[in-house]
Amino acid sequence: MKNTLSQLTRSHLFWPCVTLVLLCLANVYFNPGFFDIEVKDGHLYGSVIDILNRAAPLMLIAMGMTLVIATRGIDISVGATVAIAGAVVAALIGGSLVIKDGVQTYVSNVPMPLAIVAALAVALLCGLWNGLLVAGAGMQPIVATLILMVAGRGVAQLITEGQIVTVYYEPFFFIGNGFIFGIPVSLYIVAVVLAVLLLLTKRTALGLFIESVGINPVASRFSGISARALVFWVYAFCAVTAGIAALIITSNVKSADANNAGLLLELDAILAVALGGTSLAGGRFYLIGTLIGALIIQTLTYAIYSLGVPPEINMVVKAIVVFGVCLIQSPALRDLLMKHAFRTGGTA
Amino acid sequence: SASALTLGFAQVGAESEWRTANTGSIKEAAKAAGISLKFSDAQQKQENQIKAIRSFIAQKVDVIAFAPVVTTGWDTVLAEAKRAKIPVILTDRSIETKDPSLYVTMIGSDFTEEGRKAAKWMLENVKGQGDVNIVELQGTVGSAPAIERKKGFEEVIKSEPRFKITRSQTGDFTRAKGKEVMEAFLKTDKNIQVLYAHNDDMAIGAIQAIEAAGMKPGKDITIISIDAVKGAFEAMMAGKLNVSVECNPLLGPQLMNIVKDVKAGKQLPKRINTEEGVFPMETAAKEFPNRKY
Amino acid sequence: MKPTPVLVMQDICKSFPGVKALTDARLRLFPGEVHALMGQNGAGKSTLIKVLTGVESPDSGQILLKDQPIRPESVDDAQKLGISTVFQEVNLCPNLSVAENIFIGRFPMRGLAIDWKAIERDARKALLALNIDIDVTRTLSEFPVAIQQMVAIARALSTEAQVLILDEPTSSLDEDEVERLFDALRELKRKGIAILFVTHFLDQTYAISDRITVLRNGEFIGEYPAAELGRLELINTMVGRDIDEAGQAAKSASSADRPTDRPFISVQGLGAAGRMHPIDLDIYQGQVLGLGGLLGSGRTETARMLFGIDRAESGTIAIDGAPVRLNSPRKAVRQGIAFCPEDRKTEGIVADLSIRENIILALQARRGIFRYLPKRVQTAMADEYIKQLGIRTPDAEKPIGQLSGGNQQKALLARWLATEPKMLILDEPTRGIDIAAKLEIMDLVKTQCRKGLAILFISSEMSEVLRVSDRIAVLRDRQKVGEIDGKAADEQSVFRMIAGAEA
Amino acid sequence: MNLAGTINTRTLPLLVTSVLFALLFGFGSVSYDNFFSVQVFLNLLIDNAFVAVVAIGMTFVILTGGIDLSVGSIVALTTMVTAALVEQQHWSIWVVVPLVLAIGSLFGLLMGSLIHYFRMQPFIVTLGGMFLARGLCYVISIDSIAITDPTYAAISEYRISFGEEAFLSVSAIISLLTLALAIFLAQYTRFGRTVYAIGGNERSALLMGLPVGRTKILVYTLSGFCSALGGVLVTFYMLSGYGLHALGLEMDAIAAAVIGGTLLTGGVGYVAGSLVGVMILGVIQSLIAFDGSLSSWWTRIAIGVLLCAFCLMQRLLEQGGSNLGAIFSYWKKPAEGSAPAR
Ligand SMILES: Nc1ncnc2c1ncn2[C@@H]1O[C@H](COP(=O)(O)OP(=O)(O)OP(=O)(O)O)[C@@H](O)[C@H]1O
Ligand SMILES: Nc1ncnc2c1ncn2[C@@H]1O[C@H](COP(=O)(O)OP(=O)(O)OP(=O)(O)O)[C@@H](O)[C@H]1O
Ligand SMILES: [Mg+2]
Ligand SMILES: [Mg+2]
């Protein structure tokens, strides 16, 4: 019994989970209906669903970011990539009113699948560019991706000409607003990406190679791993997750806002990765931990909205929670408390 | 040509559609008026605007105009402009300064007045007896429009105790945030009569959230917003948005005339307001074809 | 009258998760003696030293310095108490200059500022005393490990300490350097400083030490005057069973006699400006080619070019007669070449990965991402090598960084053996490996060789090179100066060849 | 001449960066009227004085292998506290400035302690610090507060003239002094060298007996101090306190340090490089302002393109340069006795 408990606490998922549960409890305390889920219009409806749904883009990007960080890198351009991919898909689909069979319907400018593929391709391109700068030219990841972070939003605005591009084409809304068996589509997307990633990292040598490169790139290279190619593709993948997230976001608000879409998303994604237990210095990574990290962030945001926290102290609340979460997860603090407990226990 | 007038214009950024329309109007008007325009985008940072103004001074432009990111902190750089004998025009909002001679005139909207207009429309149109619970979607915390639109609105409803702001949260002027915040509001609060959004984008996001909650925006919840951009008119025509208070970005032509007047040495009032209306749902269809932004 | 010890460690216990590294370990150090701390890999030598210097805190036991109980919490504390240490592995800052590495922490000041002139001057002097003549303003990472090790030694020697601890300072130093170090130690001894010395080289133990403490499995076995403990006895005490050193060391005559028709790899004029003069080498299957030479003679450089780490600017390489271009380690691995680098900490181990993952890493890299070895196979493979090479660990899932130095080295060897290579480049493979394991590894090398493996063997231990090599290529100043038959060669002939090039 | 000695791998990035700065400036001078003037150059210093000070603090943090995301927020908080105290409480500048510097340092000290004692990741701790400091600004006031104190106004408008048309501000002078002090701190004090050692290899630094913990805490304290000083310069620059001041400044400071040749992995770089980095970011902005024809989005793209071109050139030159260095040291060898036969 004691053994399983200690094993449990040693699992890297334990403390992130504890944090998430605590946050949920806080939510329930202030808002008893927090866990209520009802069925409305044939789909699930409730706070928890909102949180999951809203966290989906963050979870996707954070997963890509996890891999990047595991290789000792960082990608601060994901927000810009979201803006670009969102702009592309919105601009391509748009939607114009036509009268078909006597009914007014909106049709897309280009076929929707094509538009989606194009958006993902553009996102991939962004990733390849980052990969090229980092792995090819050997730039430091933070500056290499800073370039796209700055220029990317410009490119997105160029595509939308500074306007918010509204999408009118109904079928596209399904991605961000639709439900399958009552559960939001975005969650299926997260599940699929997660499954693919878990498969790749656990059932192939990808995970091993990524961790190895992140821990000791030189030794990995000397063992015959092509570290550069690996790093290159990891950036590409991260951008694709941003592209998918862009589809969800764009579809969800039915419009693309080049200036604001995905703003500061990179910070949240990195925070999610760190809260999930992955070290920002690279090496061992925990995808599930990252997902929990993303959920922690979204639950916190939701709590701030629903508890009626005045907007001027949003940031303070967020800061305190971030510190609190980190303290809970800090083994050093636990050791300290443990020692203290023993000492007082011993003298008593 | 050497004789052409050069105007240095330091824009806030391109943070919204409204701003883009504002920039577009200024660029077009400058071209039409034969004024050579030096345009600088500050990406929402005051320090960038100050740098831009300095570089305009170094470039020896004829007139400097800028839309201040924030009302305070301009004295030093404007004093430099004054020393270089370059007249300065403010657009969009005014600045706080002890020395009003630092700028010639200010042309633009009055955010506080917009907030008042929104509140007045509400007092006139939201009928009934009981309490009216209002939720507010604020703009970016600390930004001038957010502060002033809130101030104007609160000023007017103060006199009517049955109107109460029950929840207020920032939506960062964006659709996505507007939607997210409204979703959370709807889950925790079943009793919302009015939504006041500091701009149209947040209102549009919130409308989606209200629809997803199975309610009818514009009917179950009265929605009031500011800016009156095209998207708002579409929403109004669909009956989902009740009213939008105009905040007119198209002050390019007016600005160019002022630039010319300043250069010609004409006396100008310290403040020139732009014409702004209030567009309730019913007038939307008629007005829509006239909208340029 | 019996002198009193400066330092006494009593009943030291230390456990790590899953391992009891020290059980009631003991140690006494007298002023003016060199004390050898001996034991197999993983016996707990480094751990004992870490406890003494405040890096690890003991679970129980006590330390007395001049009869005063001490409990250093950090290296800083220990230094203040007069305990100066060279840790196993080079623990210096690669980004700082050589001079700075020697003096950081106790810079001479001129007013408020660091006196850089004095530092450079003194650093130069300190290194010259060890016969190292290098530009001390250059960054440490520009130098090979051997030099780095000498820098670390110079750092320790130049402090005013009453206790000096050296944890395997001589692995990968050649005889000349070792002799210099010993001269310096004798000097300190005369001054009455107590020196604790860890090494796996018995010759060195006997050359310098006065007394010997033996640890086995973290336990104190005994303390002996060096003069009274014979070599074989010492080995047997360390290992805990009888080992016949001489018998195993005998040259296996068979391999070199095998007729080899054509070299596995043939190198013509391989070189790079500024790094290596063009070199010709032929390495045959079933043979060991030794590289002989002194520090900085270009042995590592040659190996790195062969493995595609450093790009050669001229020359050709043919494998089995077919020309190949080896411009990345990956390509070399694909060609069946394996390379065990000399700097295991920065170029070898992937510290946070488990032993299992470290062992299968190269094999997996060769198989590619998608042909993933099932976990079951990995574990089986790791377990087998752990057994075969005697890696001391509770299980294969422990991070390799937590292994003792020698055991890490063994795991690295396992990594390459697992790829079943056609050619194995071993750069200082016996660094930090205990005598029993060394014999086993040499044996393993021989066995592999007999099975048709080609081996390029580099070691600072000339005797080791002589023992295993069928042929020896002698390098000097990054240039090949000749090649001799391994069977006929002895140390004199090699040194003559090195010297001959000088004339 | 000891060419190989001067172009060594450590100073090369700094050299390359400076040369590229000159190139950029030259490009502007050729392309735009009135660009080539002493004052345009000095304006770079004036306008970026606070960025430079913040970047200097950041450089120390990065040199230890850490990162400090809170700098921009601490700048904003400093301006806010200053404005509140000076305007609303009418405190004297001579009390307020030391006080805010102390607050900034304390903020850094607390973050450093969390990082060291609880072994938290710097990125996260300082991210929390970033939210906290920015949040505290709004707690003081969400609106901006103008500083009308005459002393502030006087300092703000005081100009130190050089010749007829060229002048510097007090802030610029302070930033240059800070730089000089920082260079001394980094190169000639134990603290500075320990910073480098930690960045090189933290464990080694520990095993060498260096005060790693104390230095790490001090580095964040120093960064907090520099941010607060930067904040003071911002109050001189803009005469106001505002919660939205210095948004995203942390990225500028990090970028400046990195462009100036500091490695984010720690241990490599020069404080002086960060000033050059700041100047390069500044000159890119000036180029765009002088061009004056770019729309908002083209401005962003142009900044990105210039940044990219710059970094690529830097990489190219560095690689070429270190090859050059290797060749030089190769040819230096013969002096030591063994002439290579080629
Ligand atoms: N940080 C650690 N965590 C877990 N186990 C450790 C750690 N450090 C050492 N050990 C274990 O303690 C034991 C003793 O290791 P130590 O390094 O003291 O051996 P050693 O005698 O120095 O060996 P070598 O001759 O190979 O250097 C080994 O089994 C090692 O795996
Ligand atoms: N005694 C020395 N004096 C000066 N420089 C040295 C000395 N020993 C090594 N070097 C440096 O070593 C470098 C060449 O090292 P390389 O690794 O190629 O040689 P090596 O023969 O493999 O050395 P090692 O015996 O340490 O493995 C040169 O750059 C040189 O500066
Ligand atoms: Mg050891
Ligand atoms: Mg070597």
Image: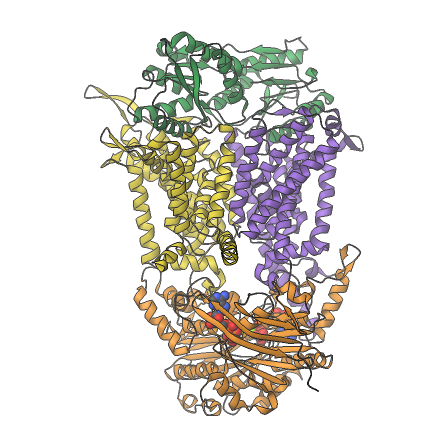
Chain colours: A yellow, B green, C orange, D purple
Residue A99 visible within the image = yes
Q: Is residue A48 above or below residue C487?
A: above
Image coords of residue C301 (percent x, y): 55, 71
Image coords of residue C447 (percent x, y): 39, 84
Q: Is residue A41 above or below residue C100?
A: above
Image coords of residue D93 (percent x, y): 73, 31
Q: How many marks?
A: 0
Give left or right: position of A248 versus A340. Answer: left
Q: Quadrant of the N terminus of chain C?
A: bottom right
Give left or right: position of B194 versus C493. Answer: left
For ligand 4, give the image quadrant.
bottom right
Residue A54 quadrant: top left
Give left or right: position of A341 versus C107. Answer: left
Residue sticking out furthest to the left: A101
The residue positioned 45% from the left and 21% from the top of the image is B199
Image coords of residue B152 (percent x, y): 51, 14
